Amino acid sequence: MKNRITLCIALLLTSIVNAAVSAEPYAIRLDKSVMIPMRDGIRLSTDLYFPDGASGKLPTVLLRTVYNKNDTLDWNKVYRKLVSKGYVVAIQDIRGRYESEGGYIVAQKRRGDGNDTLDWLTSQAWSNQKVGTAGCSYLGETQVVMAATKHPKHTAAIPMSAASGYYAPGRAWQSFSGGVFELAQTAGWFAGSGSQVFYGPPSNVDRSEWFKSPAAQLFQMAPTIDFPAYMKFLPTLPTATILERAQMPPSEYKQWASSAPDGDFFRNKDLANADDSFDVPAIFFDNWYDYGPSITFKMFEQFERTATSRKAKNNQYVIVGPGTHCDFTESTDDFIVGERNLGNASLDYSEIQLKWYDYWLKGNQDALAAMPKVQYYLMGKNEWRSSEVWPLANTRPTAWYLHSQGTANSRLGDGSLALQPPTSPTTTTFNYDPENPVPSLGGHTCCTGSDKEAGAFDQSEIELRDDILVFTSDEVSTGIEVTGQIKALLYVSSSAVDTDFTVKLVDVYPDGRAFNIQEGAVRMRYRDSLATAELIQPEKVYEIAVDLNVTSNYFGAGHRIRIEVSSSNFPRWERNLNTGGNNYDETAGVIAQNTLHLSADYPSQIILPIIPAKN
């Protein structure tokens, strides 16, 4: 009897131990540098991270990267956790990058390569036939482009900061704004990451085996980049040869800098576009101080509208936080974006991702609780808000008119902003000198190499310049929420045959600090068409629409709304040399005398999406 009791206890303890062991997270087993064949014979190197000891058919989460797969697993703590929870995580160097074969051209052959990769993954004996996709920035855009193929095994997606994957005319890869070249962002990316040169083993050596060898771990696959040397050339002319003169590796940069914003060069890129339909449930993540939240909302809308199944149509979501590019901070008491304290912006981004994959790839119906279609952070009020539609159902587009008696130059001038249009005609003028452009300070970019490339910074010192027209409202008596698309309508003229106009929305705090909220630009030669240039007639008045993209900002009681109008924001945007020439290959410019017209006939204004206060 005693022996039977002892045996039962032993069996019970063994059962408990086994249960505890099975509940432990899986260790990671790496199958490195697997060469997956594409339809044209090119092979793409892919690392497969397996949950060691997991049995049965397994779901897969795929990341396709331009930035070297060997460094990617820990970019997001979710990826390692997915493996520990029983997922296979596949991380692939895209065509022509690092370990993968082929030549690298930005945004080419991505649909076919994505489809072929999905075919291979789901043909493996361990696959449960469900593949989710993950990743931010370039890794986000590869998801969007893949989604346009509607591969039946592409089961769920989380495109993060993925606006560069969608072709909006004149905004290819987010490299232009209103026809103005995004110089610092585009040149910075190509300088740091755009190389078309990579080193590997000799052609007679098996690439897969070689990259698994200890020697390969010490091998440098990409050329050494002297980024500080590039930064010294960034302010120089001509624009198109900055990287060449900085002795950066060969890349496509020169073609990007010298092509029309909506020309054939960009139209032929493999980007998702307005003609595509989609059929994959997706959560889009973005941030207000990133370069593409307006495109993120456009993709969210198109994924839902064009969905070819009810499942996909009913499962499109978007989450927009207050941060910068790929900055999805999970928990903080004081979230500083640039210099602006935006309070506690906590959101459990990791848990949202894990539950999303568990629901779609593992069939865990309890994983995904009811989630609003739209979640957004209201800056200034510093709280998360939600909605089932975008634009918000109660949006009231409201015009705020620019006023001046003729000297709105700088924040010390007489420029004002009011809900009533001007009654007496006036103009206010500034001289724009391309040799002394307005310096960039924060904003909505990435990859520039500057420590103040993005976010909110106090603009008050820059606003002392005479080449910035400043228009400021009275103090707001009750708070005003601005959430949605912003547009300015300006009436302008110039002494030059071509020039730029820039607009910035600013939140002025009671203590005088002036934080940038959003901004936009128009190059006058592209005022009517981003595909075809047409110079302007000097001194003729033109109406221009300036797209300031989207935001969500609360102007609290005692704050003031401010608009800046100028002609440069350098080096974020390439400066216009005002000559009417190619601009990208010129080395000298002329000063333009630029004028803003303010009257009943020329009611220059900014249209803000006002959200009425809740009763």
Image (spheres, helix red, strand yellow):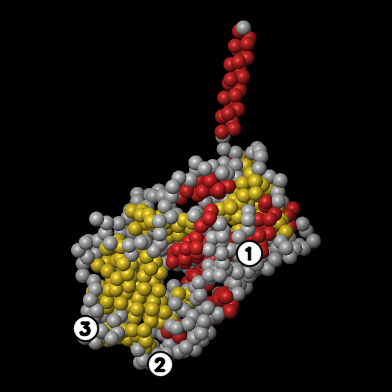
| Residue 327, visible in the rendered structure | no
Q: Residue furthest front?
A: 310
Q: Are marks 3 and 1 in contact (CB under 8 Å)?
A: no
Quarter that holds the N terminus:
top right
Circle 1: is it few (<14), some (14-19), or many (20+) Cα within 10 Å?
many
Viewer-nearest of discs 3 and 2: 3
User: SS for tag 3?
Assistant: loop
Viewer-nearest of discs 2 and 1: 1
User: SS for tag 2?
Assistant: loop
**Residue 111 tag number:** 1
Q: What residue lies at 44% left-to-right and 73% top-to-bottom?
A: 572
In the visual, does 328 lie left or right of 6?
left
Instruction: Quote the CA–CA distance across marks 3 and 1.
Output: 56 Å
Amino acid at circle 3: Thr
Amino acid at circle 2: Gln
Q: Quadrant of residue 41?
A: bottom right
| Residue 359, visible in the rendered structure | yes
In the visual, does 217 lie left or right of 296?
right
Circle 2: is it few (<14), some (14-19), or many (20+) Cα within 10 Å?
some
Quarter that holds the C terminus:
bottom left
**Label located before the other in sequence (3 or 2):** 3
Where is residue 317? Give x, y as percent: 46, 56
Q: Quadrant of residue 538?
A: bottom left
- Per the image, the residue denoted by label 2 is 537
Q: Nearer the viewer, residue 326 or 418?
A: 418
Q: What residue lies at 52% left-to-right and 51% top-to-bottom?
A: 76
Q: Are marks 3 and 2 in contact (CB under 8 Å)?
A: no
Amino acid at circle 1: Arg
**Label located before the other in sequence (2 or 1):** 1
Q: Residue furthest right?
A: 204
The image shows residue 382, relative to residue 248, as above or below, that is above
Q: What residue lies at 43% left-to-right and 83% top-to-bottom?
A: 527
